[in-house]
Amino acid sequence: RLGIPVGLVQASLGGSSLARWHPEEDGTLYRAMLRRMDVVGKVKGVLWYQGCSEANAKNCSTYLKRITRMVGLWRKELGKIPFLTVQLNRWTGCGQAAENDRYWGELREAQRLAARTIPQVYVVPSIDLSVTDAIHNSSSANVTIGERLANTALSAIYKKPGQIAPSVTTVEYIDDTHVFVRFPAEFHVFAM
């Protein structure tokens, strides 16, 4: 839609902790990424899908503070680039510890708040997409995530027609089968 090719520089490692990407913590993956940037040159933004390893009692409560600091440090090195983040899918581990689902929910909330509190951080949801096991997205879900990231980039970065996932302001439980969901004023919902 832009009429120009867009390249992706892969610097990920599945299951990696935030500490490995944080310059003030372990930082090994961050430093490896910078070596790639030395070869590639200036980048336009970051696609960020991380958090499974933080969805636990120790880390989920500090995730927002740590990711906020990490984004600031990355921007000192890479410039004021946008971060397009993918919110964690859901925990479906049947028969496993119920608190895992709670921690995943807490981490999703931290990711949502990051997009509301850190300038130029955008979040795309994945909770509605299919998984192949307790946590991993299916192939078709990954395609949808790519489309959502592309639409967010078109709209937020390139100011072209696209879509940005609205953030939910409040949810009010009406009864066992109904909820009332409020969105920020900038999002308008039309019924037909």
Image (spheres, rainbow, N blue to C red):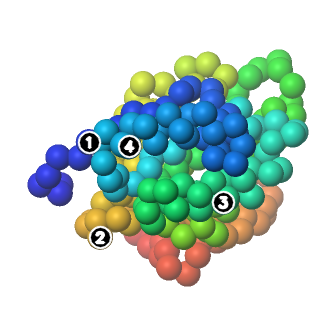
Residue at image mark 1: 7
Numbered circles on residues, count: 4
Number of residues whose C-alpha sits closer than 10 Å to that of mark 1, classed few (under 14), some (14–19) or many (20 or more) = few
Which of the two discs, 4 and 1, labels the residue nearer the N terminus? Answer: 1
CA distance for labels 4 and 1:
13 Å
Q: Secondary structure at mark 4?
A: helix
Residue drawn at x 81%, y 32% as measured from the top left: 100
x and y percentages locating residue 184 in the rendered image? 58, 76
Q: Which residue is mark 3?
A: 68
Residue 62: x and y, percent? 80, 51
Query: What SS does tag 1 mark?
Result: loop
Q: Tell me the amino acid under the disc marked 1.
A: Gly
Counting residues from the start of the chain, the first of labels 4 and 2 encountered is 4
Q: Residue at x 87, y 34 (%)?
A: 99
Q: CA distance from mark 3 to mark 1?
A: 26 Å
**Mark 3 vs mark 4, CA separation in Å:** 21 Å
Res 74 visible: yes
Mark 3 or 2 closer to N-term? 3
Tell whether 4 sits left or right of 136: left
Furthest-left residue in view?
3
Q: Earlier in the sequence, mark 3 or mark 4?
A: 4
Q: Which circle marks residue 159 in the picture?
A: 2
Depth-wise, is mark 4 or mark 1 nearer the camera?
4
What percent of the width, then of the height, locates residue 102?
A: 82, 41
The residue sitting at 29% across, 70% down in the picture is 159
Q: Amino acid at mark 3?
A: Thr
26, above or below 161, in the image: above
- Distance Cα–Cα, label 3 vs label 2: 24 Å
Q: Quadrant of the N terminus?
A: bottom left
Q: Is residue 119 left or right of residue 113?
A: left
Residue ID for mark 4: 37
Contact? badges 4 and 2 (CB < 8 Å): no
